[in-house]
Image (tube, helix red, strand yellow):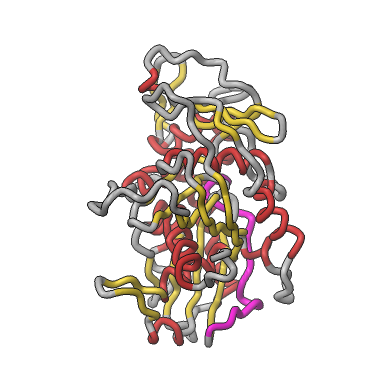
Amino acid sequence: MSESSQINQAQKEPSQQPPPDPMAVCPVGLDDGYAYTKVALADGRLFSVPSRARIGAAGVTWIRAQEQRIFEYETGGAIYSVGAVDGEETSFDEYPGSALNRVIVQHALQEAGLSGRSVHLVTGLPVGAYYRNDGQLRQGGIDQKRDSLKLTVDPRSAVRGRQQPTLKVSVAFHEVIPEALAAWYDHVIVQQADGVTLDADRLSAPIAIVDIGGRTTDYVVVQDQGIVHGSSGSLNRGMLHLKSRVADRVQEQFDLTGLGEQSIARAVDRQQLRLHGRDHDISTLVATAKRELVELLYGETRRKLGLGAELDQVLFVGGGSAALAADIGNWFPNQIIADHAAFANARGMLKYLQFVCDDVERGF
């Protein structure tokens, strides 16, 4: 199953709880990845949008408002189009603190039904962007991202199917944590019918988290509730690398000078490329690119974790782990792929916000 299919499969319908008070602050876990931006809400709902936007107005008039798929936002004096556009590249180091990231996050919060709400937010950074090799914080990058999402983003389009103006989502509190570590919080903080508990066995067990994402693959080893930095870090390879390799080979095979980012994404998902009204089988190209990526990930995973003999568990998370499940299934005898793996970080960020951040931090 493709990465986008895995993510779409995990979307949840609203719970049967009463509608939230529109004046209340809404807690949100948000994994704003380079390929997809995922949202976890306290009522259990999960949302995802492609991390796809470009600077400039949409330039499209929708014949039926219900079919609108491109939305405009303004921040820092510039207009951005988000949604069904050929998006600008997100795989650059400054993306987490950029205006491009900011408008995509605003769009994800709008799609989650939070128009006009004030939110308390926890997001993440790749492990290598959060920590230096010696474990020291990269405080400048953390502060830049924390401050960026508090800046104003004004919607310029109505919510899909409505005529009234869309109200911005305001970020009243924002904390940033390492992305793969967020999945550890998801793993050890267990919500049950009678409340929330810390799973004592999971809390004490040595575990590795492998987070295969869009641009990066993150590694975090936690032992005795401490991060083992020698076995943790980031590799700048992920599912976007696979799409880039397919794009290169498609252009070569079909003698094309360029192909839209949306077309490549659809081609990788369907293993078919549509040109001049005809479908072309590119399954061999996709398989070759996938094999190259898996070999790169396997080599780095062995360098970081060895055989994993001293670990109780190796937990794979991220959209890439779900999409590559058949290719990574036998790397360790004690491995597991998390349920709805693409949302493990977002769920963990929400749990961190609800049960680790105290009321003083959040201004209560």
Q: Is residue 236 magenta?
A: yes
Q: Residue furthest right?
A: 140
Residue appearing at x 63%, y 60% in the figure? 235
Based on the displayed image, in which of its 4 quarters is residue 41 positioned?
bottom left
In this view of the protein, which residue sits in the foreground, 150 or 85? Answer: 150
Residue 359 in the image, given as x and y percentages of width and height? 53, 70
Q: Is residue 290 left or right of residue 325?
A: right
Q: Residue furthest left?
A: 16
Residue appearing at x 55%, y 52% in the figure? 238
Residue 64 in sight here: yes
Residue 51 in the image, given as x and y percentages of width and height? 54, 41
In this view of the protein, which residue sits in the foreground, 151 or 364? Answer: 364
In this view of the protein, which residue sits in the foreground, 267 or 364? Answer: 364
Seen in the picture, residue 32 relative to 139 is either above or below; the reply is above
Seen in the picture, residue 157 relative to 242 is either above or below; the reply is above
Q: Is residue 311 magenta?
A: no
Q: Which residues are magenta?
A: 225-241
In this view of the protein, which residue sits in the foreground, 240 or 288? Answer: 240
Q: How many marks?
A: 0
Seen in the picture, residue 296 relative to 171 is either above or below; the reply is below
Q: Is residue 54 left or right of residue 45?
A: right
Residue appearing at x 62%, y 29% in the figure? 80
Residue 204 in the image, given as x and y percentages of width and height? 45, 87
